[in-house]
Image (cartoon, helix red, strand yellow):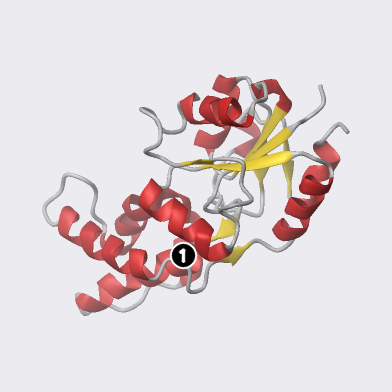
Amino acid sequence: MVIKAVLFDLDGTFADTAPDLAASLNHVRAIRDLPAVPLELLRPQASHGSRGLLEIGFGIAPGQPGYDTLRDLFLEHYALNICVHTKLFEGMALLLGELELRNIRWGIVTNKPHRYTVPLMQALGYEKQAACLISGDTCAHAKPHPEPLLMACQLIGVAPAQCLYLGDDLRDMRAANAAGMPGIIANYGYINGDASVENWNAQGSIDKPMELLGLIDL
C-alpha cells in the first residue's frame, strides 16, 4: 500500500533532545552538590523523560520520598531551557523536505506532555509544518496504547496502514503494531545497548533519517 503519511516520535527520533534533558538533570544534581553525569551515560534514558533520568541521576523512582521535589526542580529548569542545545537529528530536515515535495504529510506522536511538546516544536521552527502534534496527555492513553497514533491518523485523514511510524523505543513499536501501522526503528536514537530490537516486531529499521525514503512505496 502506498504510504501517505509519516509519524515521528519526538525525543530520540525527530530531535536530539538529550543535551538539554541532561543539562536539567545536572542542574538539579548541582543544587544537591553532586557532580555532573556525562551525557553519554544519560543519552539512552532520554526517551524516558524525567522518570528515567532521575533514576540514573539519583537512584530514585516515583512514589519514593523526595521524588516529587526532584522532578519539579528538573521540570522547572527544563521548561526554561527546552531548546538550548536541542536540534533535529542530522538528515531530518532533508527528509521532511522530501516528504513535503512528495505530498506525504508528517506529524509528531510523543509521550512528552503538551506543555513541553508545543514550545519545543515552536523553538525548532516546525510546529506549523506538522500535520498533527499528539502529546502524551492529548489522549486518555499514551503509547504503547495505539490511541495516540489512531488519533493522528484521524486528524491527518489517512488509514493507519497508509502511515509509517518512526520511533526509538519498544513502546513505539508496540503502539504501531496495535494501531495496524508499520513501525520503523530509528537505530540512531536513544536505544540502550542491551535492547533486543530484533524482538520489537518492527517492519524495518534505519540508521539515518533519509533512509526512510527507501521504505516508502511511491
Q: Is residue 189 above or below residue 216?
A: below
Residue type at mark 1 is: Leu
Judge left or right: residue 182 versus residue 44.
right
Q: Is residue 49 above or below residue 7?
A: below
Viewer-nearest residue: 174 or 104? 104
Outermost residue toward the front? 128
Residue 18 location in percent, x, y? 49, 63
Residue 96 location in percent, x, y? 73, 52
Residue 178 location in percent, x, y? 55, 20
Viewer-nearest residue: 8 or 170? 8
Residue under numbered circle 1: 41
Residue in the picture at 77% in, 47% down: 100
Quarter of the rendering containing residue 27:
bottom left
Can residue 182 be spotted in the picture?
Answer: yes
Residue in the picture at 66% in, 31% down: 202
Residue in the picture at 61% in, 53% down: 14
Quarter of the rendering containing residue 204:
top right
Q: Is residue 77 above or below residue 147?
A: below
Q: Is residue 210 above or below residue 196?
A: below
> On the rendered image, what quadrant is the C terminus found in?
top right
Please, what secondary structure does the residue beneath circle 1 have?
helix
Judge left or right: residue 96 versus residue 111.
right
Judge left or right: residue 144 versus residue 73.
right
